[in-house]
Amino acid sequence: MNEPLIQRHWAALTAPKVAPAIATSTVLILGRIWNANGAEHSTGNAALMVILAAGAATAGAFASAGRAGDSVIAGTAFATSGGLALAGVAGYADGLPLPLLLWAVATTAAYGIAARYWRTDRRDTVGYERQTTTRREEHSHVERVEALRAGAQIEVARSGAAYAEQLATALITRAALPGFNPQALTDSGLPELPATDTTKEY
């Protein structure tokens, strides 16, 4: 059977494409707000962000190490480390050029990482669609064969019923003929016919 076509809303199609830019822009804006509220040239705040960013990067390195490494956790940890570093620079710097430069670098890196996952997802989607199409075609072929077989069986059954009806009509007609003697057929070696009432009222 044909599956219903689902048309996705334009917002659902656009959201993954703008998510990296929105994320880095949000971090930059929060960093500048933090800058305006006392983080500018604050050594303690800068040291805190350095420690947090280094901790997130270390967690990402441990998560990606070895064969049992989890790429999702590692990617999340590295993204968190980059976001903390961007926020720290945006909060500590007294001008916009350096934060904007880091924002552009972070946005470019985010799109580079996201593009890899988009390609993988697209490849998986295309593979699934091909597999589904192949399976649907195989099932359609089996359904057509079974429909032909069922139709042939129905036609055979109809032919058998028509033959039986014609045979019964012939036996009844023959039994109704004048002078028909079923005992003479039995005596001649033919199989005995079922008893039929041949009495007719004239």
Image (cartoon, helix red, strand yellow):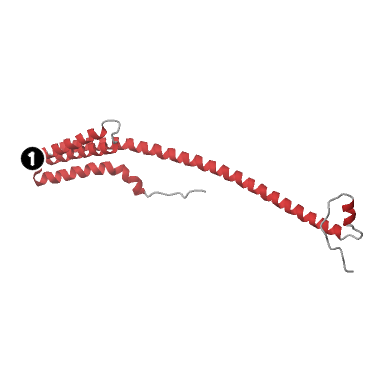
In this rendering, does residue 60 appear at all? yes
Query: Whole-percent x and y of residue 82?
Result: 20, 37
Taking depth in this image into account, of 62 and 117 the one nearest to the observer is: 62
- Work out whether 5 lies above or below 68: below
Q: Amino acid at mark 1?
A: Gly
The answer to whether 18 appears left or right of 175 in the picture is left
Circle 1 residue: 44
Query: Whole-percent x and y of residue 74?
Result: 26, 36
Image quadrant in which you'd find residue 101: top left
At horizontal 57% and vertical 45% (from top left) the residue drawn is 143
At horizontal 17% and vertical 37% (from top left) the residue drawn is 55
Taking depth in this image into account, of 187 and 26 the one nearest to the observer is: 187
Taking depth in this image into account, of 146 and 94 the one nearest to the observer is: 146
Query: Whole-percent x and y of residue 132?
Result: 47, 42
List the single residue furthest toward the bottom: 202
Q: How many marks?
A: 1
Image quadrant in which you'd find residue 54: top left
| Crowd around label 1: few <14 · some 14–19 · many ≥20 (10 Å) | few
The quadrant the C terminus occupies is bottom right
Taking depth in this image into account, of 41 and 142 the one nearest to the observer is: 142
- Work out whether 202 lies above or below 16: below
